Amino acid sequence: MGPTDLEKQHHEQIEDVHDPANLQDDTVVNRGFASAYFLGSFFAVGFNLAASTAGFALIAPVLGNISVALGPSESIIWLSLVYTLGLAVGLTLVGRLSDIFGRRWFFIGGTILGLVGAIIASTANMIPVLIRGQILIGLSASTGYSYAFIIGELVPVKWRFIANAIIFLFSLPTAGFGAAISTSLILHTGPGRYPCYYLLIILNGVTAVFYAIFYFPPTFHQKHGRDTFILGLSSCGSLYLWKSAYTIAFIVTSVDPKEPLIPMHLFRNKGYVAARLSLSLGASVYYSQTITRPQMTANVYGNGREKWVGLPTLGIGITVGEIVGGGIAKNVGKWKWQCIAVITLGTILLGLTAICSHDTPKAAMAIVFIATTFVGRNEFLVLPICTIAIRDQQEIGTAAGMAGSSQSAISTVASTIYSVVLTARMGKTIPAQVPKAVIAAGLLASSVADYMTAITAGGSEKALQAVKGLTPQILIIGTKACRHAYMDAYRTIFLVSIAFGSLAILVSFFIPDINNLMNDSVVATLHGRKYVKMAGEKYRTKRVNT
């Protein structure tokens, strides 16, 4: 199917959505972008994205501090991994099931789930309980990261990129300054996890209220009418028995039980698959660096102390790239080459961070900011392309959900690889460089083990004073050696990121050009509360009259 056929099919689907027989009459309330229901829904999606990004951006940078507060545990890494795993599972379910059954209650319920998870986490006194709360927060984040198809189906196709860019403004405080906020809370208010989760409680609560008051997308019956119900009845006693599971499921749900959860034809769409893989591989940079960058800031540039200055560059870079991309992407056009260019530049710049040293924090901060800006712009481009390049716009939620799940799954794998590589490298660089340096500076060989234990535990003044024979001069030399050793270990991470970026560059060559699909078509419209209540009765009346 060529681009012309795809464009024609888009128009045919939109005409079907707006057919008077499908109840799209003068009671539709979002006749303009200034309507209360559209604006309220827009704010709901924005707050939802802010809450979802906060669930990771506020917590991942302070895993070490949380571990110390609740008792040191190697399982603390699961606090970030269960979040991305929850997204991997939830995004496909939310996208596909809300395509079928309607979106309203999925998104209200999802934000309430996040509210419950934040309450559990804020009151936890053990890491296992905290992880359970984080699982709910990760599943809830599936609704926030579904912004691409919620907003995408409410605005004309040609405005999807700009609409997404505006939504990203809501996530700037959490995604951009999350590390700075959570680290600052720890420095100034003691145990920082509780204020972080209190913020999640507020954001999820506000989001749920906005969805409940303003978000009234097409319901199940508006999407499917009674046609599938009649098909289920007509198959009884002929093709299938009345008591068969197929017939019962068809009549009760009005959905064909043979329809797969994941439509296989999407995997045969080369352009969609390429955009989806580019999204996933590019995002692996963000999730992985969010975990390692705060540690690097403390160990290399902060001499083992928490310093939030410079931490926001990663999140701000991603978010700025997403926002700025919305303002210029449509004017530039040539979507495929935009994707290739930005992911290539992001990969090269992130790899160049490996040449920085412990004496060049400003250069490292600048390079990471510019690199992640390009990575963020790539994400901004390919996610809407995933929703536009599909052949059936009624599967927009499924397509975006599958892309998001793929993004989270690959990011989880990438995070694990980064963590394993970093742990292995630090296990080699620190023992190889630090003991030799402090012994050469005059520290007794019998005190080396105590010194290594002290710096591994964070290098507190009390622990260092207990090391026999440790002088201020030796401490300065030992600290410098530690920074060298840590930098050598983190340098490997930036080199590993080149592998993920190179794969993203490769698949970007298969991303389709969507210029011919950038039209005024709108997939779905919002309806008021009164209209939703009347919709079922109006439909029944129409069926009787015909």
Image (spheres, rainbow, N blue to C red):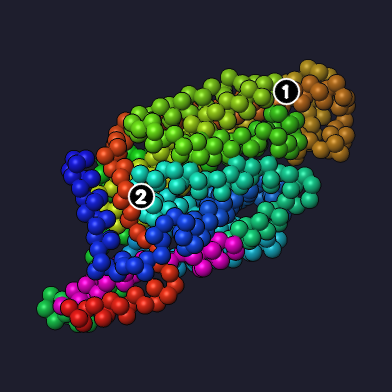
Q: Is residue 236 visible?
A: yes
Direction from residue 133 to residue 189 in the image, left or right: right
Q: Is 469 drawn above or below residue 466 in the view shown?
A: above
Q: Is 169 drawn above or below residue 418 in the view shown?
A: below
- What secondary structure is found at the residue carrying circle 1? helix
Furthest-left residue in view? 238
Which mark is on residue 156?
2
Q: Is 460 drawn above or below residue 83 in the view shown?
A: above
Front residue of 541 and 508:
541
Segment tinted magenta in the rendering: 205-234
The kind of residue on which mark 1 rests is Ala
Number of callouts in the render? 2
Direction from residue 79 to residue 69 in the image, left or right: right
Q: Is residue 414 visible?
A: no
Residue beneath the point at 51% across and 60% down: 40
Which mark is on residue 481?
1
Pinpoint residue 1: horizontal percent, then vertical percent: 17, 43
